């Protein structure tokens, strides 16, 4: 289990983390999402002890990273966004080197290395030099390296960045396998849909703060709420617009050709009530539907910094 | 016994590369050419004058050891200055620091690796150095003292290189900084002494040569230690003596003068410890912003 409490980090004048709180339950595959510069990498570097927090603390399986570094490092594996490989070493030697960094040597280290290379599909490349590996292979090697000491917690910073779709798919399959083994995995990305397929939980960070945290089901439920209503009316739109402007749950109104696109914060019951009032006002409604939402739109909504004022826009 | 993982990994990779054999070849090649040319000139002199000057054979010892010392000063910063910054550039430093390896293990692993290369260079040069034993004049104890001087120099210059490597982000900058630090230790302390002497000469009426504080700076100077060791073995006119006229004043310093070499070794080892401490502090992850 991974727990972050009121984490603060300032670089000069820039506040990177502003009281961040986060909980990753044991066995969870947690997607840590945020736009570029939101504080994802700073958070991850603080979790793995590469940066000291200005305030707050990070607990890995109940151990404070700042106070019990050695014990924490034995329980955590780290995959950075860059490969971090020695080109002049063979794949098996690379694994043995990092095994020795955890005190594993000899036959035990070799066997563990072989097993992990098999798991990530690189067992046939054990005697190859690292420099000869493709980008995807290097990333899989990095993952195998991070697992050499069999850590219960794995932290990954944008591991699929720059990989082709097939390699991404293979990588996700490996992650699912790891989750099946009971490992707690934290994976960061700035693309929410990418994580949606595999993650059990999602945390969205923006400007150093956690702006959304919950299960994948919760975020999927938000898709409907966050998507706009498409209202089609015959004849003049004025009656409908007048009613919509006065409705407390209407956040935005946009005219798109013959449709009125309404940002509506209510649930299905409220939608029904709105439809009824439009019909009663004789607005000539012949279409009333929620636009098909996406994870991307939820992410954009969560990380949107504009004020939520009621506006009326004509889309040409 | 557990071998430092960084040392083991680097020495394994290093053993496969051409870099080390090339350094050994170049180092001993220069020494061999210098020694052979010196011997050739001596033999030519004997042919011309029909006199054998045994002091000339001591000159061979001075010449070869001085060239070896200068080569070490040039090679060691190059070996150590890119070690930690190189890890940073490869983005492997963070990976190591997220294991159970500590910054101190990384710094000492790199130092031992650099020193083992230097040790290999020194040992491989023994056949050339032993040419001097054909004619005598130098004892094994003298060579032992010289080796201590080499090792102290290697530790000091290597530590300075590591500090620069830990302090700088780029290996190029670290290498430049390491050579500047060595230049500061060797030439800088000497220049300060020359300036102090010049100033004293201008202001002094009687022209006395009282010991001034800049002389103590030479305790940090590996070249001054080397020259002091060499002067003690083959006379004060030897080697780079002309560069260090200040060393003649050491005798006026009482107990400090008597134990100058020992004190210099201690000072340089303390300075090395300070460089290493700085390197460890700069490598420690929690210190990085």
Image (cartoon, rainbow, N blue to C red):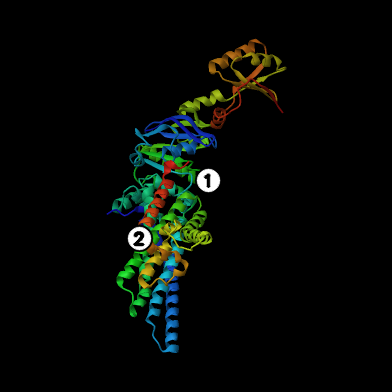
Q: Which residue is mark 2?
A: B254
In the rendered image, the residue lying farthest to the left is B1
Say if residue A27 shows up in the picture.
no
Residue A281 in the image: above or below residue A305: above
Mark nearest the camera among 2 and 1 is 2
Tell which of B178 and A313 is nearer to you. Answer: B178
Residue B215 percent location from the top left of the image: 44, 59
Residue A314 percent location from the top left of the image: 70, 25
Tell which of A241 and B68 is nearer to you. Answer: B68
Is there a contact, CB below 8 Å, between mark 2 and mark 1? no
Chain under disc 2: B
Residue at image location 65% in from the left, 13% down from the top? A243
Q: Residues within 10 Å of mark 1 (few under 14, many from 20)?
A: few
Chain under disc 1: A
Find the distance from the CA under tag 2 to the CA under tag 1: 70 Å
Q: Which residue is mark 1?
A: A162
Q: Which mark is residue A269?
A: none
Q: Secondary structure at mark 1?
A: loop
A172 left or right of A295 in image? left
Residue A154 percent location from the top left of the image: 40, 40
Residue B186 percent location from the top left of the image: 46, 61
Tell which of B55 and B144 is nearer to you. Answer: B55
Residue A7 in the image: above or below residue B129: above
Say if residue A23 shows up in the picture.
yes
In the rendered image, the residue lying farthest to the front is B206
Q: How many marks?
A: 2
């Amino acid at each position: 289990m991974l727990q972050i409490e009121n984490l603060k980090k300032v670089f000069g004048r820039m506040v990177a983390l502003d009281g961040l709180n986060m909980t990753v339950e044991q066995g969870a595959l947690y997607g840590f999402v945020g736009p570029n510069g939101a504080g994802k990498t700073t958070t991850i570097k603080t979790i793995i002890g590469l940066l000291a927090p200005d305030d707050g603390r990070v607990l890995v399986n109940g151990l404070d990273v700042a106070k019990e570094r050695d014990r924490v490092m034995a329980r955590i594996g780290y995959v950075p966004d860059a490969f971090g490989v020695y080109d002049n070493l063979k794949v098996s030697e690379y694994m043995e080197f990092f095994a020795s960094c955890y005190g594993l040597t000899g036959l035990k280290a070799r066997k563990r290395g072989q097993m992990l290379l098999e798991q990530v599909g690189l067992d046939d490349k054990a005697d190859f030099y690292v420099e000869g590996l493709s980008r995807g292979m290097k990333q899989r090697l990095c993952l195998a390296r991070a697992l050499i000491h069999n850590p219960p917690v794995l932290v990954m910073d944008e591991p699929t960045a720059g990989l082709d779709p097939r390699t991404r798919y293979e990588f996700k399959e490996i992650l699912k396998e790891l989750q099946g083994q009971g490992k707690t995995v934290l994976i960061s990305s700035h693309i929410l849909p990418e994580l949606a397929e595999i993650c059990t939980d999602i945390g969205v960070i923006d400007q150093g703060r956690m702006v959304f945290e919950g299960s994948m089901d919760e975020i999927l439920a938000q898709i409907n709420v966050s998507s706009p209503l498409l209202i089609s009316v015959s004849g003049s739109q004025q009656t409908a617009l007048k009613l919509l402007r006065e409705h407390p749950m209407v956040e935005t109104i946009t005219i798109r050709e013959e449709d009125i696109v309404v940002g509506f914060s209510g649930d299905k019951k409220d939608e029904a009530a709105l439809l009824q009032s439009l019909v009663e006002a004789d607005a000539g409604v012949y279409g009333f539907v929620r636009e098909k939402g996406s994870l991307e739109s939820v992410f954009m909504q969560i990380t949107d910094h504009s004020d939520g004022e009621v506006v009326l826009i004509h889309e040409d | 016994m557990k071998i430092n993982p960084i040392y083991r990994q680097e020495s394994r990779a290093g053993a496969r590369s051409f870099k080390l054999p090339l350094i050994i070849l170049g180092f001993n090649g220069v020494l061999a050419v210098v020694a052979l040319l010196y011997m050739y000139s001596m033999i030519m002199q004997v042919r011309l004058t029909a006199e054998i000057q045994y002091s000339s054979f001591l000159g061979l010892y001075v010449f070869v050891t001085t060239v070896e010392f200068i080569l070490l000063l040039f090679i060691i910063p190059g070996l150590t200055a890119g070690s930690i910054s190189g890890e940073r550039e490869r983005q492997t430093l963070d990976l190591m620091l997220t294991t159970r390896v500590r910054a101190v293990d990384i710094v000492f692993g790199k130092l031992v690796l650099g020193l083992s290369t230097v040790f290999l260079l020194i040992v491989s040069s023994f056949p050339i150095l032993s040419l001097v034993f054909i004619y005598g004049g130098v004892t094994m104890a003298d060579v032992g003292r010289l080796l201590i001087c080499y090792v102290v120099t290697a530790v000091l210059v290597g530590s300075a290189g590591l500090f620069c490597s830990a302090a700088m982000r780029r290996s190029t900058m670290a290498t430049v900084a390491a050579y500047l630090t060595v230049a500061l230790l060797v030439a800088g302390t000497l220049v300060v002494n020359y300036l102090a002497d010049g100033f004293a000469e201008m202001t002094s009426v009687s022209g006395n040569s009282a010991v001034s504080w800049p002389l103590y700076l030479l305790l940090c100077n590996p070249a001054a230690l080397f020259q002091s060791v060499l002067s003690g073995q083959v006379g004060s006119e030897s080697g780079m003596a002309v560069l260090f006229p200040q060393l003649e004043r050491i005798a006026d310093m009482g107990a400090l003068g008597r134990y100058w070499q020992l004190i210099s070794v201690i000072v340089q080892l303390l300075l090395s410890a300070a460089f290493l401490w700085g390197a460890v502090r700069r490598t420690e992850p929690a210190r990085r912003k």
